Image: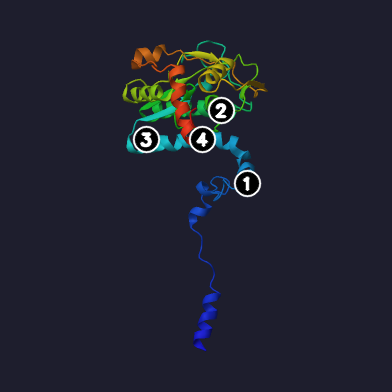
Amino acid sequence: MAATSEKQNNSSKPPPTPSPLRSSKFCQPNMRILISGGAGFIGSHLVDKLMENEKNETIKTNVIGTLNMLGLAKRVGARILLTSTSEVYGDPLIHPQPESYWGNVNPIGVRSCYDEGKRVAETLMFDYHRQHGIEIRIARIFNTYGPRMNIDDGRVVSNFIAQALRGEPLTVQKPGTQTRSFCYVSDMVDGLIRLMEGDDTGPINIGNPGEFTMVELAETVKELINPSIEIKMVENTPDDPRQRKPDISKAKEVLGWEPKVKLREGLPLMEEDFRLRLNVPKN
């Protein structure tokens, strides 16, 4: 009888109290969501729905993430490098873009969460530098490509190479005359290390000044990877910059850096990596 009574008492025990961290500002439901099986049928659709908040998360990552890292650098006395972006120049009215150019950015456009997020991150870096003496370095990186890029990340070089290997048309956003400058990843890494080890806070442009229209890039990928595919023009996204080319005079002078890998040399290296991951043998 006593055993039965004890069993009943145990079964009516309240559940343990959740950790206080569950109600902290760092663990609110809309901040961290783990989806086990997110690559599956229903899971992938669930991810799509939840990712509708991605734009808010982009600016939060830039601002809150930078603040967190600056706080850490302040506590431990570390030097901190921010990889900012050429997007801080927006749709530039000066060409090529020097670091002294303040940019031409639409603060309420569909792309603004990224552009303005990086601009705020740069502001925070300099605020901490001036107020707390934090050693900072800021790199404004331009389009970068190379092995290990996400195959379906939406960036133009990975898009073109993946499409070429799959035998799909290369989709060029209209009008196709908009330009970008592409820096191979090994050159980018070399520039970032030189900046981090040097004495200049930046910002310093790190990028390849070789400038190509989107049609020229598509034609080069087609020639090098799959001459039989077609190039297809599609509608563009709003606020797409018309031109982008770094002025790397400061990088040359201060860091002794300039890129070495030309586009026609780098694309085959990226193609090889994509072929392995897509399991597409070379004919």
Amino acid type of the residue that numbered disc 1 sits on in the rendered structure: Leu
Q: Residue at x 53, y 53 (%)?
A: 23
The residue carrying mark 3 is 73
Q: Secondary structure at mark 1?
A: helix
Tell me which numbered mark, 3 or 4, is placed earlier along the sequence.
3
| Residue 24 image point, x, y percent | 51, 50
Q: Residue at x 51, y 35 (%)?
A: 278
Q: Secondary structure at mark 3?
A: helix
Q: Which is in the foreground here, disc 1 or disc 2?
A: 2
Q: CA distance from mark 1 to mark 3?
A: 37 Å
Is 40 drawn above or below residue 118 in the view shown? below
**Mark 4 surroundings within 10 Å by alpha-carbon count, few (fewer than 14), some (14 through 19), many (20 or more):** few
The residue carrying mark 2 is 159
Q: Secondary structure at mark 2?
A: helix
Q: Closest to the observer: 105 or 33?
A: 33
Q: Closest to the observer: 241 or 106?
A: 241
| Residue 4 image point, x, y percent | 53, 85
Tell me which numbered mark, 2 or 3, is placed earlier along the sequence.
3
Q: CA distance from mark 1 to mark 4?
A: 25 Å
| Residue 31 image point, x, y percent | 55, 45
The residue carrying mark 1 is 46
| Residue 237 image point, x, y percent | 64, 24
- Coloring applied to the structure: rainbow
Q: Do the residues bearing badges 2 and 3 touch, measured as CB atoms within 8 Å?
A: no
Q: Closest to the observer: 6 or 237?
A: 237
* Left-right relation of 272 to 105: left
Amino acid type of the residue that numbered disc 3 sits on in the rendered structure: Ala
Q: CA distance from mark 1 to mark 2?
A: 24 Å
